[in-house]
Image: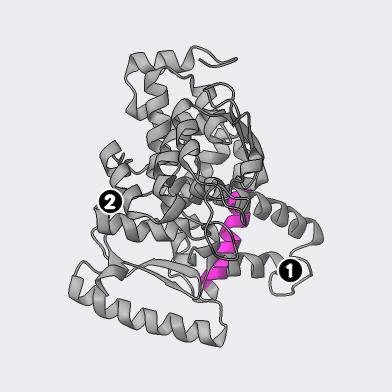
Amino acid sequence: MANNIYTPRNSKNYYLRVTIDGKEYRESLRTTSKRVAEKKARDRIKELRGKAERGESDWLFHAGFTGFYDSLKHFDPDHGWSAKTRKRYQTSLRQIGLTLIEVFEERGDDIETAGAWEIDLKTISEFVAMRKDAGVSVATINRDLTAFNHLMSHIKNLGWIEMNPVLQFEKAGMKESLPDIVLPTDAAIQKLGRRAPGTLAVFPAFLDATGGRVTEISMIKWADLKGIEKPVEGHVTLTLRHTKGRKIRTITLRQQAVDILLKIRRSNRSPYVFWNKTEDGYYRSAANMFWDYAQETEFGARLHDIRHKFAIERLKEGWSVYRVQRYIGHGSVKTTERYYFRYLSQEQQVIAEADGNVGL
């Protein structure tokens, strides 16, 4: 049971993390007592397994989101919204969904497996910050928050959450608090890789060399690489297709990444770079596997934090913020600034902002 409970950074409470039938669940156990947490975890796992056997949705945010969105397709006398209002709310909801995907990806999480309770005050604050980063007007953000408020009220009425975080946000104001980033050391990354099987042995190092997201890197194919026949920096490119919002981007690989690729034995049966022997051909649950390996090796960070390490190191060595933003796939350069400039000196920030056209 000890493997299923943990205390995340910036929290004294124990959390449950368990995978049942291929679906990962993470939630607060709302206690600082390990003994109490273990008992709550046992009960919760039993409950989740029962729901899985019955095929029931377990209070996942996307289930509440989908149900509310679909309810707007037709007139409902309970709320009495006009067709124009329902259409406006659906437009806002689509944007809310896309932005929350980005919010959770920057945490290294998946919105598809998020419980309704994980959409909290900090999530709403980050949603607003990302909308601002995208240059959206305050009026539009407020319209989105109105739809968001109705969505979370709907989920609250289902009994899935105790408080509506949008209402909490409106009372607290537009204050933003980003969590501190724990950067893994090079030695920790190497140790983590040594614990992993097959081609995953070099997966953490490849993340460190590219700054990619776990999902988009785990699904790359050899066909996505160009110029590998001349394996030198500046000649090899990688096209990432399984990205946030399916926005394809192509990056030029640094020599560190090229050298790692040259160590990987290709499979005759799988087109994937990080292949395995299952029918999928790639490591669909790479993030889940590495979470276990991280506990065993005392990694001290999340796999996703390797991406943050890449961005901060490139900025410190002189890449422009515009180049880093394009390379790692942030939707806005302001998001890159918000996450990483707090780790740069004043001089480094000036250098990072100095070249807005082509980057260093």
The residue sitting at 73% across, 53% down in the picture is: 88
Left or right placement of residue 13 versus residue 51 in this view: left
Left or right placement of residue 313 versus residue 263 in this view: left
Q: Residue 113, percent across and down?
A: 51, 64
Q: Are marks 1 and 2 in contact (CB under 8 Å)?
A: no
**Given the image, on which type of amino acid does mark 2 rest?**
Asn
Q: Residue 185, percent across and down?
A: 28, 38
Q: Nearer the viewer, mark 1 or mark 2?
A: 2
Q: Residue 346, percent across and down?
A: 34, 16
Figure colour scheme: one colour
The residue sitting at 56% across, 21% down in the picture is: 234
**For the residue labelled by badge 1, is the local secondary structure a helix, a strand or a loop?**
loop
Q: Which residue is mark 1?
A: 80
Q: Which residues are magenta?
A: 143-156
**Given the image, on which type of amino acid does mark 1 rest?**
Gly
Q: Is residue 56 above or below residue 340?
A: below
The reply to whether residue 358 is in sight is yes
Q: Residue 109, percent across and down?
A: 46, 54
The residue sitting at 81% across, 61% down in the picture is: 83
The label on residue 166 is none
Specify whether residue 125 is painted magenta: no
The reply to whether residue 168 is in sight is no
Q: Which residue is mark 2?
A: 10
